[in-house]
Image (cartoon, helix red, strand yellow):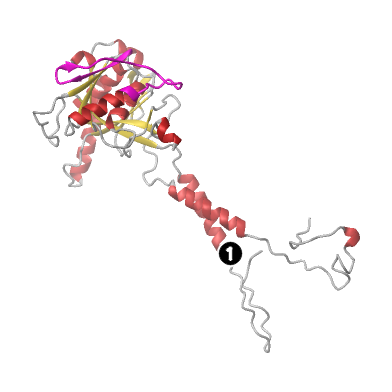
Amino acid sequence: MAGGMDLGTSSKGGKKPLDAMINLVPFIDLMAVTIVFLIMTAVWTQLGRLQVSQSGQSTSEQEPPPTQLQPITLLITEKDLKLTVGGSQLDPLPITRDAKGRIDTEKLMIKLKELKTQQPDQAAITLSTEDSVKYEDLVRLIDTVVTDPANTPLFPSVSVSPASAT
Amino acid sequence: MAIVSPGKRFGKRLSHSKVFGHGSAGHKSTNADLNVTPLVDMFVILVLFLIANFSATGELLSMSKDIQLPEAAHTEELTLAPVVQVSQQEVVVSGAVIGRVEDLAREDYLNIPALEEKLREMKKQFEDLHNQAGDTGAFKGDVNIQADKQVQFRIIKKVMFSCASAGYGNISFATMSASPDKKPETAMR
């Protein structure tokens, strides 16, 4: 065991050897205790949050949107996604799913990027959602409209409203 | 089994050989050093990995087997706030069952009165506590909704409306952090 500093024999006439062994026992003890502590306090599930607001709800911190910007609404139904800019509705995007059953957002992303190019100052979007839409799909679409795959913000201010209210 | 020094070892037959064995010069030393370098290396790597993954905020949500959170890539860090748990069976706040999802789905009301009442009570408790400490304006209205991914929006909208009515306007959806989707062309590079 690597215990004790070996400084050679302490004979009076002899030279001390230059190589000395460091006592690693306290270091290993410290490491073992640290590892046990870290494993016990570790959080293995990585959680996050998506900030949303209810449509029509205004807080004092939020500034009123500039009037020249056209409001963007994404209507989510079970079968398709309908984007509305101002008063005009764009072509509906039928919902397709990947092998894991998640909504395929590639076409929607292209449309959102186009809209962002047209209105770079627009940061708000309303997701008008039908009652039968699953929470998983809603979260997936919120995640899509917030940021593009290159991490460039698209529409970070997301409002959610029931479809019947629009 | 005896601990022996590292190095070449020959069979018993040659142990007394002057060439291969240690000969008859003397007995083997009973002291042997264990090589602790790999152990120390492993410990250092393990500690670094655990420190890199260490979360100072701790577990803010109690994970339940009834609730499978959806995945999202572009999330913010979870903050400490009241949690409304929505499973496929029931709605729970701070361990108190508010109602069954089946019953809530059948009702025509836009809000859930019991949830609203419970949240108002929690808000009052929070404000009283902070007023006593002289900390006014600490209430920001944050609330985390921890819902199962199969729950329909008809329940989520009621929960959201009830939270907003009770003064909890900063609503956050709790999600599992996932890696962002990559385009095939990006993945090819």
In the picture, residue B106 is in which quadrant? top left
Task: Determine the residue located farthest toward the bottom in the rendered image.
Answer: A13
Query: Can I make out residue B165 in this image?
Result: yes
What's the magenta bit mostly, secondary-structure-wise?
loop
Q: Image quadrant for the N terminus of chain A?
A: bottom right
Q: Nearer the viewer, residue A128 or A98?
A: A98
As for residue B40 lying within the magenta part, the answer is no
Position of residue B120 measured from the top left corner of the image (x, y, whole percent): 22, 29
Position of residue A128 measured from the top left corner of the image (x, y, whole percent): 23, 19
The answer to whether A126 is drawn above or below residue B75 in the figure is above
The answer to whether B168 is drawn above or below residue B154 in the figure is below
- State left or right for residue A18 relative to residue B107: right
Q: Image quadrant for the C terminus of chain A?
A: top left
Q: Nearer the viewer, residue B94 or A121?
A: A121
Position of residue A94 measured from the top left corner of the image (x, y, whole percent): 33, 14
Task: Determine the residue located farthest toward the left in the rendered image.
Answer: A67
- State left or right for residue A16 relative to residue B67: right
Q: How crowded is mark 1: few (under 14 residues within 10 Å), some or many (20 or more)?
A: some
Q: What element carries label 1?
A: loop
The amino acid marked with disc number 1 is Leu
Count of all numbered marks drawn on residues in the image = 1
In the picture, residue A87 is in which quadrant? top left
Q: Nearer the viewer, residue B64 or A82?
A: A82
- The residue segment tinted magenta is A78-107
What residue appears at the point 33 percent right and 35 percent down from the top-left corner?
B74
The answer to whether B77 is drawn above or below residue B158 in the figure is below
Query: Can I make out residue B178 in this image?
Result: no
